[in-house]
């Protein structure tokens, strides 16, 4: 494991940092680490780009137009 | 006497109808987002359409149980998840300790090794195709995929995802971590496999 990932302890920090669910102190720690660790910096840039890519890749299929019509038809009729 | 009681009743009914119409409009305005999440929670487009319809039918029936001011999108997704479970898609018993051979940087290493010398992170990502991503996502076991879809595609917070799936936040975090890893492995396999074909 460590052969392919020399900075495994950073994983615990990276996920919440990328998801922006960290406290100010944790964020400062994560940023300080990214400043000094080229490996994690590279990984962070890759992960950020990857996440954006995944989001775009799955968002391209629009909702079928007739489904919208069917959903609107489920509304309670006005008295 | 009956005159005085009928009037407040009529007013209450009118307010009720107005609130309901507003609720239905707000819920319908979110249907694209609900569908997008549903589409990746289940295997096919038909299933997703079906699931979204049933979700809206239930939501419109029980609109009074929605608390105005809270997250309507999360409320709808909670219904959707329940409908999905009711339909027999039981929660999968995938153990959280399922072994993963590779480290977290596996995908990057694979993509880099098959590219023409580029190590730039952004360029490396572009070696994946849209199909690689969609196919890889469908390979992630349900328990993990649900969390990845809600947080990474649906933009829900950990807390919302926990509420929607009725699991603790700690479980959201561990499944998210593992789910993203499984996703990356699957993407690496399809990308590298495509390269060799």
Image (spheres, coloured by chain):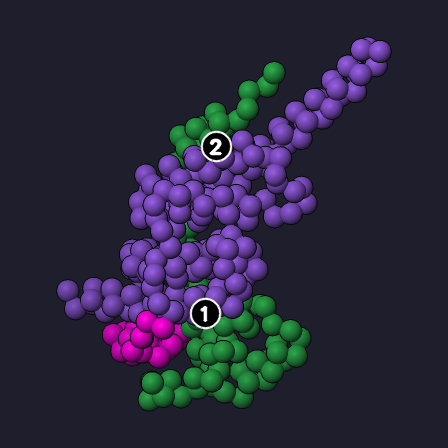
Residue at 49% across / 39% down in the picture? Answer: B31
Looking at the rendered structure, the secondary structure element under dot 1 is helix
Residue at 61% across / 16% down in the picture? Answer: A79
Q: Which residues are magenta?
A: B97-122
Residue B57, disc: 2
> According to the image, label 1 marks what residue?
B174
Question: Chain B, which colour?
Answer: purple
Find the residue positioned furthest to the left.
B197
Residue at 50% across / 72% down in the picture? Answer: A15
Q: Report the front residue among B59 and B38.
A: B59
Looking at the rendered structure, the secondary structure element under dot 2 is helix
Let me know if residue A27 appears in the view. Answer: yes
Let me know if residue B29 appears in the view. Answer: no
Q: Earlier in the sequence, mark 1 or mark 2?
A: 2
Tag 1 and tag 2 share a subunit = yes
Residue at 35% across / 79% down in the picture? Answer: B103
Q: Which chain is green?
A: A
Residue A40, disc: none
Residue B44 position (above or below residue A39): above
Q: Position of residue A35 (x, y in %)?
A: 55, 85
Q: Report the front residue among B65 and A3.
A: B65
- Which quarter shows the N terminus of chain B? top right
Q: Position of residue A65 (x, y in %)?
A: 41, 33
Residue B118 position (above or below residue A19): below
Q: Chain of mark 2?
A: B
Find residue B142 and report its image quarter: bottom left
Find residue A25 and report its image quarter: bottom right
Find residue A17 and report its image quarter: bottom right
Q: Residues within 10 Å of mark 1 (few under 14, many from 20)?
A: some
Residue B64 position (above or below residue B74): above
Q: Position of residue B102 (x, y in %)?
A: 31, 78
Residue A26 position (above or below residue B131): below
């Amino acid at each position: 494991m460590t052969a392919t990932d020399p900075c495994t302890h950073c994983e615990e920090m990276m996920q919440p940092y990328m998801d922006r669910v960290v406290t100010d102190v944790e964020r400062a720690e994560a940023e300080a680490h990214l400043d000094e660790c080229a490996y994690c910096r590279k990984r962070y840039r890759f992960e950020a780009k990857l996440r954006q890519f995944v989001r775009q890749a799955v968002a391209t299929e629009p909702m079928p137009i007739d489904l919208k019509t069917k959903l609107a038809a489920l509304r309670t009729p006005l008295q | 006497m009956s005159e005085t009681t009928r009037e407040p009743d009529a007013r209450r009914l009118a307010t009720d109808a107005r609130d309901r119409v507003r609720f239905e409009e707000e819920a319908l305005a979110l249907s694209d987002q609900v569908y997008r999440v549903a589409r990746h929670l289940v295997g096919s487009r038909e299933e997703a359409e079906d699931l979204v319809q049933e979700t809206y039918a239930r939501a419109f029936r029980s609109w009074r149980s929605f608390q105005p001011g809270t997250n309507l999108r999360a409320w709808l997704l909670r219904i959707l998840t329940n409908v999905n479970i009711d339909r027999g898609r039981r929660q999968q018993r995938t153990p959280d300790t399922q072994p993963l051979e590779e480290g977290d940087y596996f995908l990057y290493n694979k993509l880099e090794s098959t590219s023409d010398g580029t190590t730039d992170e952004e360029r490396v990502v572009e070696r994946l195709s849209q199909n690689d991503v969609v196919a890889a996502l469908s390979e992630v076991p349900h328990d993990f995929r649900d969390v990845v879809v809600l947080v990474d595609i649906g933009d829900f917070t950990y807390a919302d995802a926990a509420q929607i799936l009725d699991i603790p936040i700690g479980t959201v975090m561990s499944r998210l971590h593992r789910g993203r890893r499984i996703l990356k492995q699957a993407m690496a396999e399809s990308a590298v496999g495509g390269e060799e074909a």
